[in-house]
């Protein structure tokens, strides 16, 4: 019979599963107790927040006039920001659409900048530049082999157009162009044909009418084959362009296009008139290479010394829009800073009203503390009250600002806009104002002595 082994004095007799310290028998699995405790704390905290919010709303309803006057300052501040930003967004979206008048992958070269916001002193250097002549433009057209199309154009005249059916107001533009201007300008022919190289070469007296101009001059039928008198000269209509509609209250289709050579013969300026060159790249990948090629060709033609800046401007839709955004950014920042002063004043008013409210409700605070309310409950109640006041004012200010700002869109007959970013930012600022200016009164209320508060009359 084998003797039983002697017990090991270094070995614990308690089974691991029954260890009362590390894993007591019958205890829940690891992680269950902390999870339950966390859920309980979350439920308690959420209930306290809801209770504080309800009490804050009750306090606001109990003092309607005082609450209305308090949120009025926030309303004015948010309204001033949102109304300006909405109006500027309306103008910006439509001006950017107007600046995007060039076709896809197209840039323009001319003597003058596309957009200029400086004073007369800065504009002097552009006056000193040499004109871009028709000969120089033709040489660019011949050498720019990377380009899909190259157009040359300029404005010749503005006045009244006459047909046998009627007359227009004296606001019709007469544009001289080549065949390459049509894809570069995104002019789509609705009826007829565009200008051809033969029209330009032979300086023919033909014209292409904008959509609305054709309807005004020929309201009862097609304009093709008809004669139009522009500045006393008759032109044969060979095409009508698709209508683009109005932009910022002005008609985009109230113009006529003639061969640029016809206009130069009629109005002069073969050497002294500065023309515009419109270049369309084959695709987006070839855009930069095409622009550099045209820049190099024109610098060589105009004999610009190496190292000196270009004596011409090369710009696209993106550069024009970028310049416009840079200018309007400073305006928006200025408006936001000025409007923030109103919000600051509103915040001071909220703090003042909240301090008065704390004094008036001292006994109420004492009662709450006596029946078990903690400091954090009092703190949360008064901060939420300040935030709710600010948010009410902010919501009303945002609504009025968006509606008033879009009145500009209605007057200009353009689509309305909703600046979501500024709406969200305005409401976030309201919450921040409520937290910042409501914290001190809330701390003061939370730190009131319960016994002294109960004695307060």
Image (cartoon, rainbow, N blue to C red):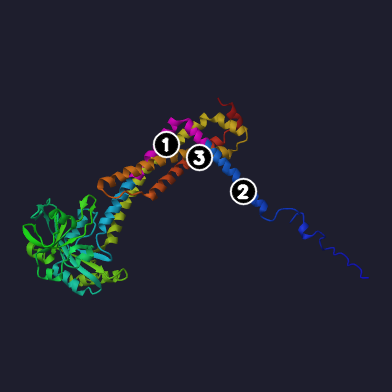
Which mark's residue is nearer the viewer, 3 or 2? 2
Element carrying mark 3: helix
Tag 3–tag 2 contact (CB < 8 Å): no
Q: Main secondary structure of the magenta part?
A: helix
Q: Say which label, 3 or 1, has the lower sequence index.
A: 1
Label 1 CA crowd tier, 10 Å (few <14, some 14–19, many 20+)? many
Residue range in magenta is: 55-83
Q: Secondary structure at mark 1?
A: helix
Question: Mark 3 and mark 2: span between their CA atoms?
Answer: 23 Å
**In what quadrant of the picture does the C terminus appear?**
top right
Q: CA distance from mark 1 to mark 2?
A: 36 Å
Looking at the image, which residue sits at the far front? 220
Q: Work out whether 188 lies above or below 34.
A: below
Q: Position of residue 314 (x, y in %)?
A: 24, 64
- Where is residue 374? Give x, y as percent: 60, 38
On screen, residue 225 above or below 144: above
Which residue has dot 2 on it? 39
Q: Which mark is residue 384?
A: 3
Q: Quadrant of residue 320?
A: bottom left
Can residue 341 be spotted in the picture?
Answer: no
| Res. 156 image quadrant | bottom left
- What is the CA distance from the residue labelled 3 to the residue labelled 1? 14 Å
Q: Residue 390's image quarter? A: top left
Contact (CB < 8 A) between labels 3 and 1? no
Residue 71 — which label?
Answer: 1
Left or right: 177 with respect to 164?
Answer: right
* Mark closer to the chain start, 1 or 2: 2
Establish if 306 lies above or below 116: below
Residue at (73% x, 53% y) in the render = 27
> Are discs 1 and 2 less than 8 Å apart at CB?
no
């Amino acid at each position: 019979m084998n003797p039983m082994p002697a017990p090991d004095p270094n070995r614990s007799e308690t089974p691991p599963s029954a260890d009362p310290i590390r894993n007591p028998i019958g205890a829940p699995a690891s992680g269950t107790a902390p999870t339950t405790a966390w859920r309980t704390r979350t439920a308690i905290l959420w209930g306290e927040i809801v209770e504080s919010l309800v009490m804050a709303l009750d306090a606001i309803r109990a003092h309607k006039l005082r609450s209305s006057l308090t949120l009025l300052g926030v309303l004015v501040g948010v309204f001033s920001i949102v109304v300006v930003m909405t109006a500027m967004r309306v103008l910006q979206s439509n001006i950017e659409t107007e600046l995007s008048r060039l076709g896809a992958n197209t840039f323009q070269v001319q003597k003058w900048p596309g957009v200029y916001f400086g004073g007369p002193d800065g504009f002097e250097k552009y006056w000193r530049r040499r004109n871009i002549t028709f000969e120089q433009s033709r040489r660019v057209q011949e050498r720019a082999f990377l380009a899909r199309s190259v157009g040359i154009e300029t404005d010749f005249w503005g006045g009244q157009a006459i047909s046998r059916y009627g007359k227009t107001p004296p606001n019709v533009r007469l544009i001289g162009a080549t065949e390459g201007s049509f894809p570069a300008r995104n002019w789509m022919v609705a009826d007829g044909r565009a200008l051809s190289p033969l029209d330009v070469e032979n300086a023919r007296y033909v014209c292409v009418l904008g959509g609305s101009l054709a309807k005004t001059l020929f309201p009862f039928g097609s304009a093709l084959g008809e004669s139009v008198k522009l500045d006393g000269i008759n032109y044969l209509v060979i095409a009508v362009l698709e209508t683009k509609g109005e932009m910022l209250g002005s008609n985009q289709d109230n113009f006529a296009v003639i061969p640029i050579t016809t206009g130069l013969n009629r109005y002069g300026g073969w050497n002294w008139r500065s023309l515009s060159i419109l270049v369309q790249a084959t695709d987006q990948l070839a855009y930069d290479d095409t622009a550099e090629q045209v820049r190099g060709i024109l610098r060589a033609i105009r004999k610009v010394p190496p190292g000196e800046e270009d004596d011409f401007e090369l710009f696209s839709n993106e550069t024009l829009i970028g310049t416009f955004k840079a200018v309007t950014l400073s305006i928006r920042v200025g408006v936001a800073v000025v409007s923030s002063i109103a919000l600051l004043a509103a915040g001071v008013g909220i703090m003042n009203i909240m301090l008065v409210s704390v004094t008036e409700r001292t006994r109420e605070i004492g009662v709450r503390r006596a029946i078990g309310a903690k400091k954090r409950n009092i703190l949360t109640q008064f901060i939420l009250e300040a935030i709710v006041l600010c948010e009410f004012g902010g919501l009303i200010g945002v609504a009025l600002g968006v509606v008033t700002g879009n009145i500009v869109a209605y007057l200009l007959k353009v689509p309305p806009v909703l600046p979501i970013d500024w709406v969200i930012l305005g409401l976030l600022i309201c919450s921040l104002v409520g937290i910042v200016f409501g914290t001190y009164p809330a701390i003061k209320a939370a730190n009131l002595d319960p016994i002294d508060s109960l004695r307060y009359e």
